[in-house]
Amino acid sequence: MFRLSESWYAEPIFDYEYKSYQLLAYAHEVSNCFSERKFYPYISDLGNHFARIQLFNQSKLLFEESIRRDIKDVDIEHLSILRAPVPDESGLLAELNQILLFAEKQLSSTYNKGIEQLNQTQSQIQISPVGLVISHYRHGYLFFRRSRLTRVYSYTVRLVQRPFGDEVYKDVVTNFLSEINTGMLTNFGEIKWKLIRTDKAAGNAFLIETNEELPQIETLLPLAKKHIIKQAL
């Protein structure tokens, strides 16, 4: 898949037309993934690009404001001094501003459409606990039921510290165990307890059901992980 670097907007080739095609190619591929109902990691990557563009734009505006020196006018009504804009003889700032404006609009539009499609897809998925859920349990099982087959995963909730700073966040590690035949009358509680008897550390289990053909890795599994994190204290 076509990917953008974190600082794509400021890297060579520094040209508005080139950057526009570069961004449109990325947005097109991401939109195709959303159309196929593949949302992860694409929706997160897209959101991060949008956030970085906004942060860079704010920082750039603050920097430009801080280096303005020549007084252009005085705004009596608002009691403020208006300073002349930073000289841009090379035209680079104007080019960058044009790139950032286009990127912010394009990324925002693509991201919002992706979130809308994701919400529609989530409404077609049912996640329910199998038996009691104990919030402090960090291990358990996921049953992905589709037609007469069910994929069984084990999961573990872990705490991960970011490389820089003291911030800690929750992460879910999954492991595919097996695929079993199941029917309308299958007792998932019984399957859960059979698994627990061989794995003393496990406690909770969740059943994920949908009538749609959704991607396992790019959609179902990440949404199940998000659900587990919300359940865990």
Image: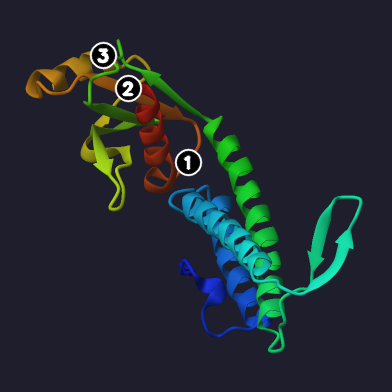
Residue on which disc 1 sits: 213
Residue on which disc 2 sits: 233
Q: Nearer the viewer, mark 3 or mark 1?
A: 3
Q: Where is residue 96 in the image (x, y as percent from the top left)?
A: 65, 75
As rendered, which of 192 and 116 lies closer to the eye?
Answer: 116
Q: Mark 2, residues whose alpha carbon is within 10 Å: few (<14), some, or many (≥20)?
A: few
Question: Image check: 126 left or right of 65?
Answer: left
As rendered, which of 92 and 225 lies closer to the eye?
Answer: 92
> Residue 130 lies in what quarter of the image?
top left
Q: Mark 1, residues whose alpha carbon is within 10 Å: few (<14), some, or many (≥20)?
A: few
Look at the numbered disc 2 and give the secondary structure of its residue: loop
How far apart, in angstroms, are the residues tagged by discs 3 and 1? 25 Å
Residue on which disc 3 sits: 189
Residue beneath the point at 52% across and 84% down:
12
Q: Position of residue 102 (x, y in %)?
A: 70, 67
Q: Quadrant of the N terminus?
A: bottom left
Q: Is residue 148 visible?
A: no
Look at the numbered disc 1 and give the secondary structure of its residue: loop
Tell me the colour scheme of the image. rainbow
Residue type at mark 3 is: Gly
How far apart, in angstroms, are the residues tagged by discs 2 and 1? 32 Å
Question: Image check: 98 left or right of 50?
Answer: right
Labelled pair 3, 1 in contact (Cβ < 8 Å): no
Q: Mark 3, residues whose alpha carbon is within 10 Å: few (<14), some, or many (≥20)?
A: some
Q: Quadrant of the C terminus?
A: top left
Look at the numbered disc 3 and give the secondary structure of its residue: helix
Give the mark nearer the N terminus: 3 vs 2: 3
Give the mark nearer the N terminus: 2 vs 1: 1
